[in-house]
Image: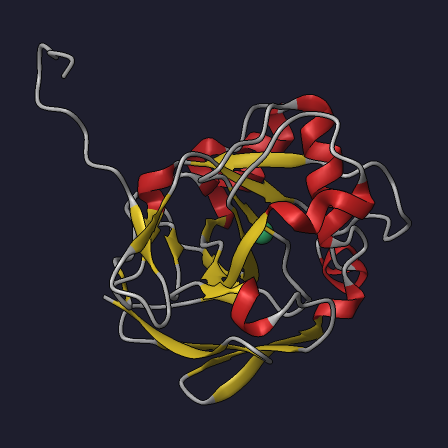
Amino acid sequence: MAQYVIDTPAVVGIPVAGSDASFPVRRVYCIGRNYAAHAVEMGHDPNREAPFFFQKNPNNLDPSGTFPYPPHSNDVHHEIEMLVALKSGGTNIAPDRALDHVFGYGLSLDMTRRDLQGEQKKMGRPWEIGKAFERSAPCGPLHKASDIGHLDQGRVELKVNGALRQEGDLNQMIWKVPEMISYLSDYFELAAGDVIMSGTPAGVAAVQKGDVMAMRIEGLGEMEVKVV
Ligand code: MN
C-alpha cells in the first residue's frame, strides 16, 4: 500500500440502481450545444459543427437531491442532461463499438453560473468558474445498460415547482452518444469511470433558493433536486 503525505481524497461514487455498490468516477466530460433548439436560444448556429467539450470535476457530482445556491452569481441556470457512464475506454474508438464501453445511464443537471460563464465567453477565457463549481452536477442513480439497454430516444423534461421549463427528446441530440464517445477517444484516453454529460434541450432558465427541480428522462425515471 502506497504511503501519502496527506489523507487521500475520497473516491466519488454514483449510486447504481438495484445494487449496493456504487460507480467510481474518474473524469467528467460535458458537451456544449448538443440540441439545436438550445444552441439557438444561446445565440448560436444550430448546424452541425464539430462538437466541443468542457469538464467538470468528479466531486462536483452530487446524488444527494439538494443543490446549494453557489456564491458570486445571480443567474444560476438548470440544464437537464443524460449522464453516460463508461465501464471501459481506450483511444480511437469506432462509433459502432462505442456502446460496448457504456456501463449505464442516469439523470443529471449541468448547473451553470450563467452570468460568470457569459463574462468568460466574452473574454475568451475558460468556463470553469461558470461550470465546475461545488456540487454543480446533481445526479440520480445509474441504470445499467445490461438492465435497460441503450437509450437513443425518449422524452426529456425538467419542471421547476411543477411548471415545465425544459423539454426535448434524446433523439434530438446533434452528436449521438456513440459519436461523442468516439470523438472524445480521438483526443483523450477514455477509461472506466469516465462519465459524459450529453447536453441539454432548450428551456434553460434561472433557479432561486427554495425551488424544486424535477428531472425526468423516459427510461431513467425521475428525481427531484431542491435548491437550498
Ligand atoms: Mn450543459
Q: Residue at x 49, y 39 (%)?
A: 194
Does residue 211 show up?
yes
Q: Residue at x 25, y 38 (%)?
A: 11
Task: Assign the C terminus to one quadrant of the image.
Answer: bottom left
Q: Is residue 78 left or right of residue 14?
A: right
Task: Assign the N terminus to one quadrant of the image.
Answer: top left
Residue situated furthest right in the rendering: 47
Does residue 33 show up?
no
Q: Residue at x 67, y 45 (%)?
A: 32
Residue situated furthest bottom in the rendering: 162
All told, the count of numbered labels is: 0
- Image position, residue 7 (x, y; %): 8, 23
Q: Is residue 159 above or below residue 41?
A: below
Q: Is residue 4 above or below residue 167?
A: above
Residue closer to the observer: 158 or 145: 145
Colour scheme of the picture: secondary structure
Q: Is residue 130 left or right of residue 189?
A: left
Q: Is residue 25 above or below residue 127?
A: below
- Image position, residue 210 (x, y; %): 27, 75
- Image position, residue 146 (x, y; %): 55, 65
Quarter of the view holding residue 19: bottom left
Q: Is residue 181 left or right of residue 87?
A: right
Q: Residue at x 69, y 23 (%)?
A: 187
- Image position, residue 24 (x, y; %): 34, 44
Quarter of the view holding residue 36: bottom right
Residue closer to the observer: 132 or 152: 152
